[in-house]
Image (cartoon, rainbow, N blue to C red):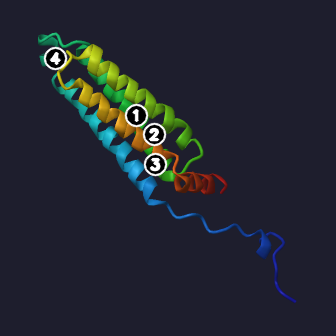
Amino acid sequence: MQNESPLSPSPDETQPAPIKRPPTVTTLTGFVLFFSAWNGIRLGQAIAFRDLLQAYAARGGYLYSALSGGLWLVVSLVVAWGLWRGTAWAQKIAAPAAALYALWYGFDRLVIQHPHPGWPFAIGIVIVLLAVFYIDLFDPDVSAYIQSKSQR
C-alpha cells in the first residue's frame, strides 16, 4: 500500500509546467523600460532646470514637463512590471497606455512645443513603434505566457 496524502494531487491533477518567458516579453519589457528611463530623465531635467524653464517661459512650464514625465514614468514602470510577471491585466493596461502615450506625444510635439520641421518624421516613427509594440503585445506566445501565468 502506498503512502498517499489526501492533500497531494493525483497524477492526472498535476498542472503542466509553466511556459517559459518568451523573448518577445523580454523585448516588450525592455521597450517599456526605455520609455520609463526617458520619462524619468524628463522629470529629472524639469526639476533640475526649473529656473531656466521659467526664465525662458517654456510653453507648459516646468510643472507640465515634471508632471507628464512623472506620470509616464509611473505608468510605464507598472506596465513593465506587469508584462515581466505575466499578470492577467498586463495586456489590458499596456494597449491603451501605449495609445495614450502616442496621442500625448503627438499633442506635446505639435501643440506644446514650437513645431519643428521634422514633426512628420517624428510622428511617423511613433506610428511605426506603436505598430511594432502592438504586434509584439498581441503575439500568440505573449498571450499564451500571460494566460499560463494567470491560471496559476
Query: Dot 2: within a 10 Å radius of its alpha carbon, few (fewer than 14), some, or many (20 or more) residues?
Result: some
Q: Is residue 43 above or below residue 15?
A: above
Residue identified by numbered label 2? 78
Residue located at (33% from left, 39% from top): 35
Instruction: Specify few, some or many for label 3: CA neighbours under 10 Å numbering under 14, 14-19, or 20 or more.
Output: some
Amino acid type at image mark 1: Val
Q: Earlier in the sequence, mark 2 or mark 3?
A: 2
Kindly indicate whether the residue at mark 2 contacts the one at mark 1 (C-beta within 8 angstroms): yes
Which tag, 4 or 3, sits closer to the chain's start?
A: 4
Q: Which residue is mark 3?
A: 136
Q: Position of residue 4 (x, y in %)?
A: 82, 79
Q: Secondary structure at mark 4?
A: helix
- Measured as percent of width and height from the top left, residue 31 is found at 36, 46
The residue sitting at 43% across, 27% down in the picture is: 100
Q: Residue 27 in the image: state x and y as whole percent.
A: 39, 53
The residue type indicated by label 2 comes to Val
User: Which amino acid does the dot numbered 3 rest on?
Assistant: Asp
Q: Position of 37 compared to 26: left or right?
A: left
In whole angstroms, how far apart are the C-alphas of marks 2 and 3?
18 Å
Circle on res. 53: 4
